[in-house]
Image: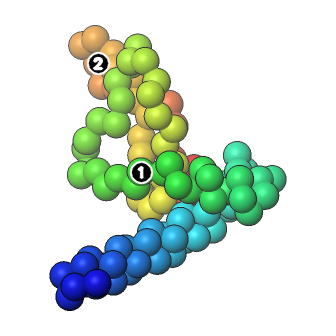
Amino acid sequence: MDSEAAVDALWANISKKAKEAEQVTTAHFLKKNPVFEDLRARELASVAGIVHERTYEAGAFLFELNQTGAAMFIVKTGEVEILVPREGEKSLILATLSDGD
C-alpha cells in the first residue's frame, strides 16, 4: 500500500469512528423523546443513522400551512413557535415548543 492509500484508509477510519460517535450521541438524545423511548439500541441506532441535524436562524420558517409533510422535527435546543397566519391580523400562536419537543 502506498502512502497516499494509507492516508486515505486512515481518514476513512477516522471518519467512520466520528460518524459512529455521532450516532451514539443522536441515539442518546432520541431515547429521551417519548416517541423513541421504547426502541431497542439497534432500532435507535437505525433511526439515528437517518437523522439530519439542522440549525435554523431566528424567525426562519420550517414549514408552511398546507405544505405536505416531508420530515419530522425535534427541537434539540431553543424554541419553535407553531403559527397560523390570519389575514389582516397577527398570526395565531398554536404552540411554543422547546428542548426535546
Q: Quadrant of the N terminus?
A: bottom left
Q: Is residue 30 visible?
A: no
Residue at the image position 43 percent from the left and 72 percent from the top: 16
Q: Report the residue marked by disc 1.
A: 52
Residue at the image position 34 percent from the left and 24 percent from the top: 64
| Residue 71 picture location, percent across and down | 47, 34
Residue at the image position 40 percent from the left and 55 percent from the top: 53
Instruction: Say how many tags the image has.
Output: 2
Q: Looking at this view, is 19 or 81 the one in front?
A: 19
| Residue 82 located left or right of residue 35 | left
Q: Is residue 73 visible?
A: yes
Which residue of the protein is positioned furthest toward the left in this rendering? 4
Task: Indicate the amino acid at tag 2.
Answer: Glu
Crowding at label 2, few (<14), some or many (≥20) Cα neighbours within 10 Å?
Answer: few
Task: Indicate the amino acid at tag 1.
Answer: His
Q: Quadrant of residue 84?
A: top left
Q: Report the residue marked by disc 2.
A: 89
Crowding at label 1, few (<14), some or many (≥20) Cα neighbours within 10 Å?
Answer: few
| Residue 62 picture location, percent across and down | 34, 36
Q: Looking at this view, is 61 or 52 the one in front?
A: 52
Mark 1 element type: loop
Q: Quadrant of residue 5?
A: bottom left
Mark 2 element type: strand
| Residue 47 located left or right of residue 73 | right
